[in-house]
Amino acid sequence: MIQIKETCTGCMACRNICPVGAIGQETDPYGFVMPVVRPEKCIRCGRCEKVCPLLQNSGTDEERCLPLCACAARHREPEVVEKSSSGGAFYALAERVLQRDGIVFGCYYDTRHKTAYLTDTDHMPLERLLTSKYVESYIGDHLKRVKRQLETGREVLFCGTPCQVAGLVSFLGRPYDNLLTVDFTCGAVTAQGTLRDYLDTLEKRYRSRIVRLSFRDKYYGWGQYCFLAEFENGKTYRKTAMSDPYFFCFLRSSMQRLSCHECRFSDRHFSDIILSDFWKCGDFEEAMRSFTRSDDSSSRKTKESRSLPFAAHREKQEQMDRRGLSLVLAMTSKGAAALGESRKDSLLLEDLDIQRASYNLRPRVCPEEKLPEIRADQACAHQEGVTALRRRLLSPQKRLHYAFRQFIMDRPHIAAHFPTIVGHGQLMVPSGNSGKNGAGTNRSSGESGKNSAGMKLSSGESGENSAENCEEKRRSLVEPRKSATGKRNLNL
């Protein structure tokens, strides 16, 4: 009989392989789903221990640690790219399987029940399985369903987290020629209950039910993580990652599952293909030229690009595709063959250097001294909510900075004047408070401290003159002005 530990990933391979249904599931004190053994039903067959990926020796073979090929990818249809998290590579792979009367398994988020769970295209349109969901998904007995579909000879694509794919491969026990497994460079998963409580708070604030939820809305562009909730009454909640409490705590790794802090599968994957956002595409100038040319001709026509004058201020933006770009790593010959077929049909692919493109395949280790802090953050998120956790993690000055940044980004006619504030920095938290700087941003070493607009000063500027210029520009943008009718209006 398997001993469930707190480092369990929740892949549910043990539950699916149990012949008598002696393993169920329940939530732990921090809101995460854990398998639970019912001793009165257990027949001591030992299958649960043999199937657990964490109890196996190494997980994958040494030759599978590095990919066979690496590519930058983007779907040929701009509409597909717009509704995908990055470049639409998953849609192309799934489309290939569905054209052969196959079935695709993936994660779907149900806004009515506020639950993410594994489902398939026999019960859900493919579009519902697109985009990232930054929360753990319920697997239930779906691994059994995957096996039944494989045994009928039907082609199957299974997409999940690296630990879920590891659980599936271990559960199946042997390779299947008609199975294509896809995972991604997973940051972590959070508890379902934590997200559900946060969404309940939003529904109370807007007095309406959420009908659509997106963790990777591209309103601010691909380079800016954006949390979107659309309500039944027509209202919309949209915030960048640093301004939204849930996304902020997720990126700070403050409410992750404990197994995610020291993931066994971050650098050793069971899958045929690994997908991720190609954040470092600016470092591959030669390979990015074809994407940059196509971006110039079509991407700027979208409504997202029209509303983003500040997108050009992102570091190395000239080499980046603003609609999104995927990094695809083929770990097996089967995965490489699937990429080759997708290249002919619907994917734009550019080959990359394997060593340089494998930057995401690195081990993740958590020092033991950080465990009490992690548990405290998990407890705070589960009991008090992510808003309280964000308030505890951020100083008032930093909260003011992110609020001001969000204020500016929601007003495109102002954003172009504040490139330092609205530039790419959603993953970075300022290293310290900025004293008298009213916007709460970091100061460069040459600043005089009088820049109340929170803008960086170039090396050739004098402190006082630059501060006066910034203050004058700020007043011209945000101070009340009289309209032609004599009324005072805010130019916001």
Image (cartoon, rainbow, N blue to C red):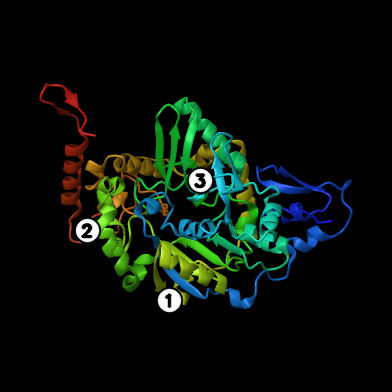
Residue at image x 55%, y 43%?
A: 109
Which residue position is annotated with label 1?
353
On screen, residue 57 above or below 406: below
* Front residue of this view, candidates 96 and 144: 96
Q: Nearer the viewer, mark 2 or mark 1?
A: 1
User: Callout 2, which amino acid?
Assistant: Ser
Disc 2 vs disc 3: Cβ atoms closer than 8 Å?
no
Give how far apart the Cα atoms at labels 1 and 3 are. 33 Å
Res 419 seen here: no
Q: Secondary structure at mark 2?
A: loop
Mark before the other along the chain sequence, 2 or 1: 1
Say what secondary structure mark 3 lies in. helix
Residue 267 numbered tag: none
Is the C terminus in the top left, top right, bottom left or bottom right quadrant?
top left
Residue 457 horizontal side relative to residue 399, left or right:
left
Tell me how far mark 2 sits from mark 3, CA to CA.
47 Å
Extreme bottom residue here?
A: 63
Relative placement, left or right, of 223 versus 264 is left
Do the residues bearing badges 1 and 3 touch, measured as CB atoms within 8 Å?
A: no
Residue of label 3: 128
Hey, what amino acid is under mark 3?
Arg
Tell me the mark number nearer the camera, choosing from 2 and 3. Answer: 3
Q: What's under tag 1, amino acid-wise?
A: Asp
Nearer the observer, disc 1 or disc 3?
A: 3
> Is disc 2 surrounded by few (<14), some (14 to 19) or many (20+) residues within 10 Å?
few
Q: Is residue 340 left or right of residue 141?
A: left
Contact, mark 2 vs mark 1 (Cβ under 8 Å)? no
Q: Position of residue 366 (x, y in %)?
A: 61, 61
Q: Is residue 375 visible?
A: yes
Q: Which residue has dot 2 on it? A: 458
Q: Residue at x 71, y 68 (%)?
A: 174
Residue 418, percent from left and from top: 25, 48
